[in-house]
Structures are given as C-alpha cells and as structure tokens.
Amino acid sequence: MKTRIVLFTLLSIIAISCRNKGCIDPLSPDFDERAIKDDNSCTYDGRLIFWFDENTKDNLEVFGVNELRIRTDGSFAGTIELSEWVNQQPACNSMDGFRQAIATNGEDSKVVAYEVEDDLGFMITSGMITVPNSECVWIEVVF
C-alpha cells in the first residue's frame, strides 16, 4: 500500500511539472501564464520601423501632404503624421516612427513587402525587406 501511495505521488508530481512547462517571458507572443518552468519555447516577433527626417517632412509639406500610409504584405498597416519626423534613426525600443510587429512564426526571419504612399495617393517608396526574428529593421522614407 505504501508503495502505491509513493508511486502515485511521484507520478502526480511528474505530471504536474510537465504541464507547467512553457514560455515564461511575458514579452513573447508565446507567453503561457500557467507555465512555471521555461522550456525554451519562447519566440519573438521582428519589428519593422518606418521613419523620416525633417528634410523629408519639409519636402512633402510643399506638396500638401499631411500623412503617410503604410501597407505591409498587401494590407493596410497604419499611418504616420508628418509631425512625427525624427532627426535620426529611432532606437529599437523607442516609440518614434511607425512600428509594426512582424510575426516570424518560429522561423528565423520573414520577407515583407511594403509600400508607403502619401495621403494624396502617390507612391513614395516600396520594396521587400527581410525582418529577422527578435530584431528591428528600419526603413527610412526619403522624399
């Protein structure tokens, strides 16, 4: 009888500890709030950051532009007002520029198609860029 109790207790502990493994980093999209032990399953999105300087802002204002519209992989991603210009490339962890998380879905990177047009409908720039998992990639919009 004692052997059965000890065996049952050991099996219960093993079962519980296995269920509580997972990603314990709340910054990861894979975060599991029930996880107690890290099993190295955390992945991190890449970040794509669009930005422009005062010179580009001034050049666009001459044509009556107020904002830029950003599309990634064919879908509308958001806008950035001309008043949001910065003097230099923003830091990865700053809030400057337009930022978009790029899900790499566990892969090392993802190739993203992008387009930037003004609010008058004219294309400013477009292209393809590789966004590595867990890293920032910057696109400076120049006009």
Image: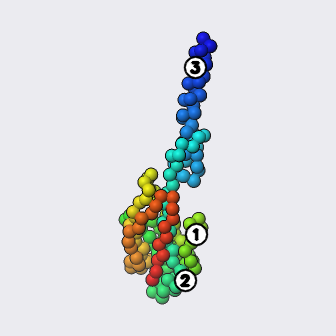
**Callout 3 amino acid:** Leu
Residue 45 at what x, y percent from top left? 49, 57
State which quarter of the image contains the C terminus: bottom left
Q: Earlier in the sequence, mark 1 or mark 2?
A: 2
Tag in front: 3 or 1: 3
Q: Which residue is mark 2?
A: 54
Q: Outermost residue toward the top?
A: 1
Which residue lies under the disc numbered 1?
A: 91
Where is the N terminus found, in terms of image quarters? top right
Mark 2 or mark 3: whose residue is earlier in sequence: 3
Amino acid type of the residue that numbered disc 2 sits on in the rendered structure = Glu
Q: In this orientation, does residue 95 appear?
A: no
> Rounded to the nearest whole Å, what is the CA distance between mark 3 and mark 1?
55 Å
Q: Please identify, in this view, whether the residue under mark 1 or under mark 2 is nearer the observer.
A: 1
Which residue is denoted by mark 3 in the rendering?
Answer: 7
Whether residue 103 appears in this view of the structure is yes
Tell me what residue is drawn at x 37 percent, y 65 percent.
74
- Dot in front, 2 or 3: 3
SS class, disc 3: helix
Element type where label 2 sits in the image: helix
Q: Residues within 10 Å of mark 2 (few under 14, many from 20)?
A: some
Label 1 packing within 10 angstroms: few (<14), some (14-19), many (20+)? few
Residue shown at 45%/72% (left/top)? 69
User: Which residue corresponds to the image point at 39% horizontal and 73% vertical from the top-left?
Assistant: 126
Secondary element at image label 1 = loop
How many numbered dots are placed on residues in this image? 3
Q: Front-most of 35 and 6? A: 6
Image coordinates for residue 11, horizontal then vertical, percent: 56, 24
Please state the horizontal and vertical placement of residue 129, each as a whole percent of the image: 41, 67
